[in-house]
Image (tube, rainbow, N blue to C red):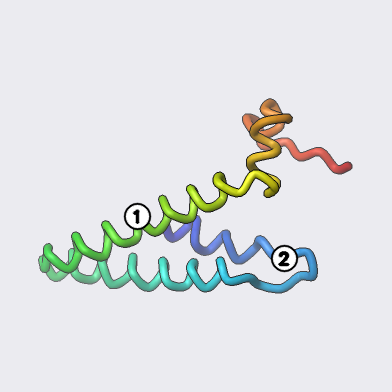
Amino acid sequence: MYVVVLTSFGIRTLNGGFSWLHGLSILTFITVTVGLAAAMKRNIPPHKSFMLGSYFGVLGAFIGVIAVPERRIPQMALHDLPCCRFGWQRWY
């Protein structure tokens, strides 16, 4: 989760700025950190709550990205599957 959160800041909007999704990345970083700290203190109920919250938050973000058909990711998945599978990007 830390790798995904930190690499998300390398993705910018078309004008080079950050979007509201980066705010969710910060929230995810905080919840994973608090959940990890709770686990290290052997305080399992808060650990479970924070980890489930992080999981369902990421799942909700994934569904939000897939649910909007005009976005680039669903379009690539439908029309350019080999590009998605191997991580190649067309520049056109």
Question: Residue beneath label 1, please?
Answer: 56
When asked about the image quadrant of residue 18, the answer is bottom right
Q: Quadrant of the C terminus?
A: top right
Residue 32 falls left or right of residue 26:
left
Which amino acid does the dot numbered 2 rest on?
A: Thr
Residue 24 position, x and y percent, is 48, 68
Between 15 and 65, which is closer to the camera in this rendering?
A: 65
Which residue is most to the top?
A: 82
The residue under the point 78% across, 64% down is 14
Residue 62 position, x and y percent, is 49, 49
When asked about the image quadrant of residue 30, the answer is bottom left
Question: Residue beneath label 2, please?
Answer: 13
Residue 28 position, x and y percent, is 41, 66
Labels 2 and 1: the sequence-earlier one: 2
Q: Quadrant of the N terminus?
A: bottom left
Local crowd size for mark 2, using a 10 Å CA cut-off: few (<14), some (14–19), many (≥20): few
From this view, report whether residue 33 is shown above or below residue 82.
Answer: below
